[in-house]
Image: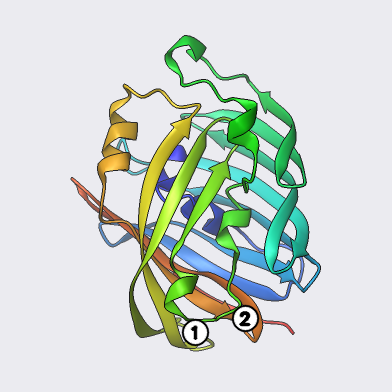
Amino acid sequence: MRSIFILPLMVSLLATPAAAADLYMKYKLYALSLPIGSGVLNLDADEDSYSLSANGETAAFGKLVSDGKGAVKSSGKVKNLSLAPASYALDLKSEDETGTVALNMKAGKVDKVAVNPPQDRMKERIKVTSAHLKDVVDPLSAALLPAPKGLAKDSCNRTLRIYDGKERYDVHMRYKSRRSARTADGRFKGDVLVCSVRYEPVAGHRPKRKTIQQLAANKSMEVWLAPVGDKPFLVPLRASISLPFGSLVVEAEKYKLSR
């Protein structure tokens, strides 16, 4: 799942239906234009709180993506249109990795971390310190972007400080363009923001690992952000990355607002 994540938003998009929510979005994952995964994103958000839940699976695609399935959920408060995550839980089962992660967060700081099984090769990793765990969001909360200015350039220009229970990394987003887009079901049809995305490892990773170095050097990552009805939030409609073998794309096919 880490391999297909690429963008920290991608793993948050691979989900299957959950309970009724403010927003339901169904996605498909493509490698070389071939469908290798699908799912939905379920979101509830208002002026005071938010919650997201996801679970999904992928099919094997060479050495890049393995058969796997997982479930993830997060929730927190909204304060002055900023997210204050409170909890995050991931349960992952795949050919490459199986385990669970649970985070509790208070006032923008990670309070408790439970990872099973624990990380290996700790001597090779950049140590995660208490300073790294301040003012961070979890990977699933990163899929919900407060945007009081709507589809303005400033809504792209931000840095997401993400901690997934094992690694701390930054995702730098910058405005590229504004374009029209639509989902296959026709329920979303309108403008989206196109943002470039750059991954920067901070701590918890192995700096000599080739995949980390390649991902940090990759300048092709891009995400399209769409509005959540009339709410002051944006969510990914599409995310993509070019790799030596070709491209990986996560794209929304269905978009349904329940209220």
Kindly identify the residue that appears in the image at 62 percent across and 19 percent down. 118
Neighbour tally class for label 2: few under 14, some 14-19, many 20 plus, Cα within 10 Å: some
Does 238 sit above or below residue 150? above
**Residue at far top of view:** 123
Q: Which residue is mark 1?
A: 185
Kindly identify the residue that appears in the image at 65 percent across and 28 percent down. 130
Q: Amino acid at mark 1?
A: Asp
Of pointers 1 and 2, the one earlier in the residue sequence:
1
In the rendered structure, the answer to whether residue 111 lies left or right of residue 118 reads right
Q: Which mark is residue 208?
A: none
Callout 2: helix, strand or loop?
strand
Q: Position of residue 57 (x, y in %)?
A: 53, 49
Q: CA distance from mark 1 to mark 2?
A: 9 Å
> Which quarter of the figure has residue 149?
bottom right
Does 203 sit above or below residue 237? above
Name the quarter where the C terminus is drawn.
bottom right
Is the Cβ of the residue at disc 1 closer than 8 Å to that at disc 2? Answer: yes
Q: Amino acid at mark 2?
A: Lys
